[in-house]
Amino acid sequence: MKFVEEVKAYAVDHYEQAGWDILVETYADDEIAEIVENAIDSNDAINIMREHIAPISDYRAEIKSTVW
């Protein structure tokens, strides 16, 4: 489970930014590990995770924008 703790710590520190709350609230350690398994360092793992959650965060923002 390489880099999982670093990714989680970054997500907590950036909870209200760019969908990191999604990771904190919904991802288990093994899911994070699977997503970042090919990362070469913790910065790479964070970037990989950012790319993974970005479409989810964007979709959520799109749905929120339709609220009357």
Image: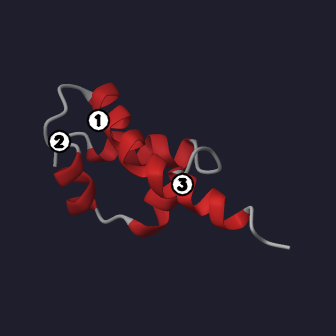
Assess disc 1: are there few (<14), some (14-19) or many (≥20) residues with their C-alpha within 10 Å of its C-alpha: many
**In the drawing, what numbered circle is on residue 45?**
1
Q: Position of residue 51 (x, y in %)?
A: 38, 40
- CA separation, marks 3 and 1? 18 Å
Task: Identify residue type, mark 2.
Answer: Lys
Assess disc 3: are there few (<14), some (14-19) or many (≥20) residues with their C-alpha within 10 Å of its C-alpha: some
Instruction: Work out whether mark 2 precedes mark 3 in sequence or the reverse, and give the earlier one.
Output: 2
Q: Position of residue 58 (x, y in %)?
A: 56, 52
Closer to the camera: disc 2 or disc 3? 3
Task: Please name the residue shown 22% across and 49% down the image.
Answer: 35
Please determine whether, in this image, residue 65 is positioned above or below residue 39.
below
Task: Identify residue type, mark 1.
Answer: Ala
In the picture of the structure, the residue carrying the numbered disc 2 is 2
Assess disc 2: are there few (<14), some (14-19) or many (≥20) residues with their C-alpha within 10 Å of its C-alpha: some
- Which element is circle 3 on? helix
Q: Position of residue 67 (x, y in %)?
A: 79, 72
- Asked if the residues shown at circle 3 and circle 1 are in contact, with their CB atoms under 8 angstroms apart, the answer is no
Taking 64 as reference, is 56 left or right?
left
